[in-house]
Image (tube, rainbow, N blue to C red):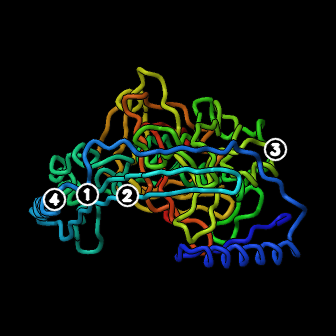
Amino acid sequence: YGSSWGFAAIAELTDAAARRAGSRAAAIAKASATVAGPPMPLRDVPPADAEYRTPVLEDPFAVPLAEKCDLLVSVTTTMLEEAAVRLARANLAFWETEKWFASSQGHRVHQVIVESGGGMDATAVGEDETQRRSYPQAFGQYETGGYEVVRRFDLPAHTHRLATQAAALLSAPPCPAGTMDLVLGASQLALQIHESVGHAVELDRILGWEAAFAGTSFLDLAQLGRLRYGSDLMSITADATLPGALGTFGFDDEGTPAQRVDIVREGTWVGVLSGRDSAAVAGVEPGGMVRADGYGHLPMVRMTNVGLLPGPEDESLEAIVADTKQGVYLDTNRSWSIDDKRLNFQFGCEVAWEVRDGQLGRMLRNPTYTGITPVFWSALDRLAGPSEWVCWGVPNCGKGQPMQVAHTGHGASPGRFRDVRVGVSA
């Protein structure tokens, strides 16, 4: 109504309940409009009569529970064979979400989204600290698809490595403090994208509509198409059509088709994550990025698969390390902190290795690094190619009040950043 939304949800599928919910939503919208801004148009989206289903090779819900439990017991038991490992965890998770979307504008969309994944970690306990190693990444890895996703991880093949590395970290030297070249593994770079790019380019944050839970954004719409976000190697897209990625679907919760949108092109900020209302205000096309955490929540702008395009075909982590005179290689996220403008950040990783004269050296414990978003991304000067690119799934992206959780994907390959401050403790 005017510039304001009204929202009401019901669990009772009757005409009378629907009328009550409609009346309540209209009343809320009218009340909100008394303190809101000028009228807000919605970008037009052609009505769709469509169906979308996640391609699934092996139904995860048809795999016997005993088989799943045997896998989890086996990998945790093996990790506990390392004397220093006192805690071993493993998990599998599967979702099947069925949605029907109908609108007064003519949409009739039916979707079935299937998501699968899991992971494991080993925690070693020393006299005065603990150290953890995780696989495939911290919190596991998740994709759209069936049980074939889990089989591809081959969890048993990685149990010994995790346990021995966790134990070795207890006696490893600490990560040195200083300014040096930083090589990031793909999974850590994925979280860097999530926090310093993905949330920052959400249009509701940029417009100041979303601020209470995790802040707004350092970006200003007047800079769109001109701001240098990073180096020429930095090209980021939001692609909800990417096969197998966790943020992939057919239509968003406004009926907009899934699509690929350029966000950063060769270092220049060129796009945003938007919905039909925010796109109308900003004068851009809606990107199909509005989703809700269930029917009882108001849909909002959410990340889809926000990923960094890979480097040249012949580039690799091995070649990047070989080209690094002195620095550190960090992998697997352990902690994250970023300010309410998505500008100043600090990350910690599970493990690091020193890099000296093009070779990986000693394992290092408690590695951290810090930076300022556009300065950090401008320091990107090497990026591994498509063969090492992975779209990492994040199943726990929180936003809004009341909090909503979304599943997102972030593609990345290992990369190098010059002159980064590492080894920070405060």
**Residue type highlighted by circle 4:** Pro
**Residue type highlighted by circle 2:** Glu
Residue at the farthest top position = 314
Mark 3 residue crowding within 10 angstroms, few (<14) / some (14–19) / many (20+)? few
* Residue 170, placed above or below residue 369: below
Q: CA distance from mark 4 to mark 2?
A: 17 Å
Q: What residue is pinned by disc 2? A: 96
Q: What residue is pinned by disc 3? A: 283
Mark 2 residue crowding within 10 angstroms, few (<14) / some (14–19) / many (20+)? some
Residue drawn at (57%, 30%), measured in percent from left and top? Answer: 233
Q: CA distance from mark 2 to mark 1?
A: 9 Å
Give the foreground label among 3 and 4.
4
Q: CA distance from mark 3 to mark 4?
A: 51 Å
Specify which label sits upstream in the sequence, 4 or 2: 4
* Residue 110, placed above or below residue 88: above
Quadrant in the picture for the N terminus: bottom right
Residue at the farthest right position = 38
Q: What residue is pinned by disc 4? A: 64
**Quarter of image, res 16:** bottom right
* Residue 232, placed above or below residue 156: above
Specify which label sits upstream in the sequence, 3 or 4: 4
Q: What residue is pinned by disc 1? A: 61
